[in-house]
């Protein structure tokens, strides 16, 4: 089984990506990223306010967006989580 550097199976990461690709165009755009932020916030017990959580997720997305087109493709996400 292939896993990411944070011990998530690649197949699971791909499933999560496609769950948030709401229009199924192969990219997570800004609207879908906002949906991801809001839905994922409640999944974790943390001390971050929603604004801080949003900033964290958006910063991570900017880091993963290797071609700077404002959208995340599956290969960008897998690459970001597979780097050592």
Image: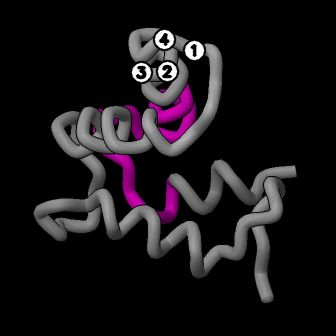
The residue tagged 2 is 53
Q: Secondary structure at mark 2?
A: helix
The residue at the point 42 percent across, 21 percent down is 54
The residue at the point 80 percent across, 54 percent down is 6
Q: CA distance from mark 4 to mark 2?
A: 6 Å
Q: Confirm or deny contact between disc 1 and disc 2 (CB under 8 A).
A: yes
Q: Image height check: is 25 above or below 28?
A: below
Q: Confirm or deny contact between disc 2 and disc 3 (CB under 8 A).
A: yes
Q: Confirm or deny contact between disc 4 and disc 2 (CB under 8 A).
A: yes
Residue 22 is marked as: none
Q: Is residue 44 left or right of residue 18?
A: right
Nearest to the observer: residue 73 or residue 60: 60
Picture quadrant where residue 15 is located? bottom left
Picture quadrant where residue 60 is located? top right
Q: Confirm or deny contact between disc 1 and disc 4 (CB under 8 A).
A: yes
The residue tagged 3 is 54
The 10 Å Cα crowd at callout 4, few under 14, some 14 to 19, many 20 or more, is few
Of labels 4 and 2, the one closer to you: 4
The answer to if 19 sits in the magenta stretch is no
The residue tagged 4 is 49
Q: Image height check: is 71 above or below 81?
A: above
Q: CA distance from mark 1 to mark 2?
A: 6 Å
Of labels 3 and 1, the one closer to you: 1
């Amino acid at each position: 089984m292939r896993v990411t550097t944070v011990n998530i199976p690649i197949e699971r990461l791909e499933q999560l990506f496609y769950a948030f690709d709401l229009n199924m165009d192969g990219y997570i755009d800004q609207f879908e990223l906002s949906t991801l932020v809001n839905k994922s916030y409640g999944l974790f017990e943390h001390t971050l306010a929603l604004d801080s959580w949003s900033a964290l997720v958006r910063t991570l997305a900017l880091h993963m967006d290797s071609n700077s087109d404002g959208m995340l493709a599956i290969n960008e996400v897998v690459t970001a989580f597979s780097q050592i």
